[in-house]
Every structure is written in structure tokens, then in C-alpha cells.
Amino acid sequence: MFRGGNAVNLDTKGRLALPTRYRGQLDEECGGHLVLTVHDDGCLLLYPAPEWEDIERKLVRLPNQNKQTRHLQRMLLGHATEVDIDSHGRILVPPRLRDFAKLDKRVVLAGLGKKFEIWNEEIWEQGCNDWVATAGDETNMPESLESLIL
């Protein structure tokens, strides 16, 4: 289970060092084999390969007569890129994915259960500020969250 946010640096070659607290788990869970893809919120998603393979199977099986379904398949599957953790605990984020998420030197790696999101640090901070500003607005609360007790 991945949780918490970490501000990390992206080096000039596009390598991102994963925090040491995740490396052992990722090595055990997937041998350091991960998959990066895009998300329509403007971030990247990073999955251990076995988790991604489950999602990929579901995406491939979706009937694609619907235009939104085809678009989702094209975006997620078409951008899916296999990456491996190197001996220094880094992954290489390809230029095309860095450009998509507007990743520069400072990024945020957010652990969200079975995956990570990778964000441009400024966009992440703005999103957090926006969330705090609208947190009390219950008019847009999805029904699935109404029974959640924190």
C-alpha cells in the first residue's frame, strides 16, 4: 500500500528517484518493473506492472463502440510505458510523458494505494489549495462519499 506525498527532483535526464521507503516493496511486489501512463487530470500514473496488467486487461475488454471508451483506451494504453527501477532507485520518465504532465525539476510523487500519481509540484500545490477552498461545498459531493466517515 502506497501512501503519502513526496516532493522529489527530476534530474536533467528525466530520472526520478523513488523514495527509499517504497523501493523494497516495489522490488518484492514487481521486481522493480513498473508502468507509467497519463491521466486526464494532467498527471502521470505509475503502477507496479502486475497492477497495471489487471487494468490493461479490463481496458482491452471494454466494448469500444463508444467514442469516450475509445479515447480512454487510446490515452491510457497508447501512453503506457514500461519502466524499471535502476540500481540507484530511479526510473526514467520519457520526454513525451514529461511534456504531457508539464514535469520540470520539482515533482510530487503521491502514493494512492496501489499506484502513484506524479505531478508538477506547482500544479499539485494549486490543486491542494483549490481542494481546501472548496472542501466545505457539499453540493457536488458524490453519493459514494456521503457515507464515508473520516
Image: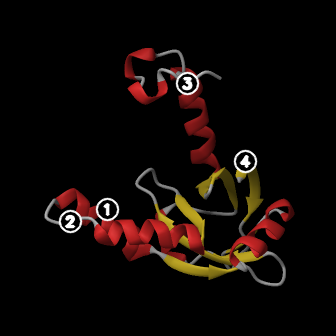
Give x and y (percent) for residue 136: 53, 15
The quarter of the picture where residue 93 lies is: bottom right
Give the residue number, with chain letter if any, for mark 3. 148
Q: Are marks 4 and 3 in contact (CB under 8 Å)?
A: no
Q: Nearer the viewer, residue 12 or 37?
A: 37
**Could you tell me how far apart the alpha carbons at marks 1 and 2 are, in whole angstroms?**
12 Å
Q: Where is mark 4, residue-wise?
A: 5
Left/right of residue 38 with respect to residue 72 in the rendered view: right
| Residue receiving disc 2 | 63
Q: Secondary structure at mark 2?
A: loop
Q: Secondary structure at mark 3?
A: loop
Image point (29%, 69%), residue name: 61
**Comparing labels 4 and 2, the label whose residue is closer to the camera:** 2
Kindly identify the amino acid type of the residue bearing the numbered disc 1.
Answer: Leu
Q: Tell me if residue 123 comes above or below residue 130 in the rendering.
A: below
For marks 4 and 2 on the same chain, the one whose residue lies earlier in the sequence:
4
Mark pair 1, 3: CA separation: 28 Å
- The amino acid type of the residue labelled 2 equals Pro
Q: Are marks 4 and 1 in contact (CB under 8 Å)?
A: no
Q: Is residue 74 visible?
A: no
Residue beneath the point at 81% across and 62% down: 19
Tell me which label, 1 or 3, sits earlier in the chain: 1
